[in-house]
Amino acid sequence: AGDPAAPGDATTAARPTAEALTAADELAEAMDLADEEDARREAAARGAAAREAAEEGANDGGRSKRRRQQRLGGAKADRPAAAAALSLPPSFQPNPLLLGLSPDAYVLRALKGVRPADLEAAALSLPLADALRLLSRVRSLLLPGSPGSASPELLVRAATLLVRVHAPALSGSRAARSALSRLKGPLRAAARRARDALAENEAALRHLCRAARARGRVA
């Protein structure tokens, strides 16, 4: 028998169950579809930009081309957020497998489908590459106006679990450290929004309790 695991070890905190493994597979499949759709959106936007540039010609000395390249250039560094901001041509047809949702919203749907009790084990079951992809999606979903702006608690918890259970591998990867650095600001802002919403709900609950007690005294 091996040595007992240290307290707080991810292997003791959440041993993957069949349900957690299935949830991890479904998350990976959702991210695959979302990544493919992002690539299609980028290709469509680049094609539309190229056609627009050809129509305009070179009369402006290439300034329009440079502006379009700047709009499209962020996709490699942070594809989900960059792809979400692309201007798509009217002819673009979304993948029907995404059920009419944006790529980010489709991943959020899959994340919401994971039972809270299975979320940590599902995070532990994801390979590092998929964990990084999900962290990138979480960052995009945490941005203001994104589909995840109404689910900060879930996204903050998912990001926290991913970082905790994959901490050794994340700390040893330059790409992972860069992804975590980009996540830090949106994550803190989302945590503040979740905390503020909880405080508002508690204040409203106290007000309702006082009003109920007051009605009881009047009666």
Image (tube, grey):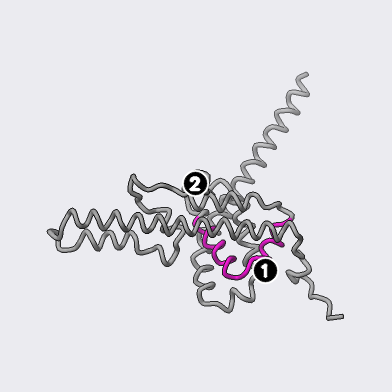
Residue carrying label 1 = 165
In the image shown, does 162 or 131 lie closer to the viewer?
131
Report the number of discs.
2
Quarter of the rendering occupied by the N terminus? bottom right
Is residue 125 on the magenta stretch?
yes
Which residue is depicted at the point 64% across and 46% down? 198
Q: Please state if 181 lies on the left or on the right of 27 as rendered.
A: left
For the residues labelled 1 and 2, the Cα–Cα distance comes to: 34 Å
Question: Mark 1 near mark 2, Cβ–Cβ under 8 Å?
Answer: no
Element type where label 1 sits in the image: helix
Element type where label 2 sits in the image: helix
Outermost right residue? 1
The percent position of residue 6, horizontal first and vertical second, equals 79, 75
Which residue is depicted at the point 67% across and 34% down? 207
Q: Amino acid at mark 2?
A: Pro
Residue carrying label 2 = 96
Give the crowd class for mark 2: few <14, some 14-19, many >=20 residues within 10 Å: few
- Give the dominant element type of the magenta stretch: helix, strand or loop: helix
In the image shown, does 192 or 206 lie closer to the viewer?
192
- Residue range of the region highlighted in magenta in the rendering: 118-140
Is residue 172 on the magenta stretch?
no
Q: Please state if 60 lies on the left or on the right of 11 as rendered.
A: left
Quarter of the rendering occupied by the C terminus? top right
Give the crowd class for mark 1: few <14, some 14-19, many >=20 residues within 10 Å: many
The percent position of residue 142, horizontal first and vertical second, equals 52, 54
Which residue is depicted at the point 76% across and 61% down? 17
The percent position of residue 110, horizontal first and vertical second, equals 61, 52
Q: Nearer the viewer, mark 1 or mark 2?
A: 2
Q: Quadrant of residue 67?
A: bottom left
